[in-house]
Structure formats: C-alpha cells, structure tokens
Image (cartoon, rainbow, N blue to C red):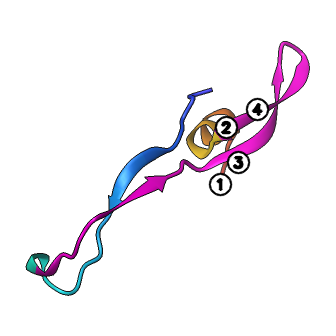
Amino acid sequence: MCRKGPHSANSVPRRGQRKHVLARSKGVQKPNVQDRHVMIDGQYRRMRLCTRCIRTITPRART
C-alpha cells in the first residue's frame, strides 16, 4: 500500500566519545514489511504491508 522499500545508510562503529568514530561502511536498512490477507472489493488478497499500514487498517480493542 505505501510501497516502502530498502534504503541505504551508513554503519558507524563507535568507541566511546564522538571523536573516536571509526570508518563508516555502507549498509542497507529494510522496512518491517509482512504478508497479510486483506479484503478488497469482497475478495481476500495477499499483500505486503508495513506494520504502520497494518496498525492503520486493524481495528483496536477497547480497554
């Protein structure tokens, strides 16, 4: 639904204070995307949804 995908980021190892930052290496951060069955137009379809979208479409129980 929201079409999230992986994006690049730096992996920064640290040893103590900021001035002791070592070399940065490239890395990939992946979104929390899960397979869910969702009813669309009266039919269940399997979709890959991020957890934010799952929380949006799932009714919450009242406490």
Q: Counting residues from the N terminus, which is met first, the one under dot 2 or under dot 1?
A: 2
Q: Which residue is mark 3?
A: 61
Q: Which residue is mark 1?
A: 63
In which quadrant of the rendered image does the C terminus lie?
bottom right
For the residue marked with disc 4, what is the amino acid? Answer: Met
Answer with left or right where residue 59 lies relative to residue 16.
Answer: right
Label 4 near label 2: C-beta < 8 Å?
yes
Label 3 near label 1: C-beta < 8 Å?
yes
Element type at mark 1: loop
Residue at image position (59%, 50%) is: 32
Q: Which residue is mark 2?
A: 49
Residue at image position (67%, 33%) is: 57
Residue reaching furthest to the bottom = 16
Residue reaching furthest to the top = 41
Q: Quadrant of residue 54?
A: top right
Residue reaching furthest to the left = 19
For the residue marked with disc 3, what is the amino acid? Answer: Ala
For the residue marked with disc 1, what is the amino acid? Answer: Thr
Labels 1, 3: front one: 3
Q: Check disc 2: other Cα within 10 Å, few if <14, some if 14-19, many if 20+.
A: many
Q: Which residue is mark 4?
A: 47
Answer with left or right where residue 63 lies relative to residue 28.
Answer: right
Q: Position of residue 3 (x, y in %)?
A: 57, 29
For the residue marked with disc 2, what is the amino acid? Answer: Leu
In which quadrant of the rendered image does the N terminus lie?
top right
Q: Position of residue 21 (x, y in %)?
A: 18, 75
In the figure, 14 relative to 60: above or below?
below
Residue at image position (12%, 76%) is: 18
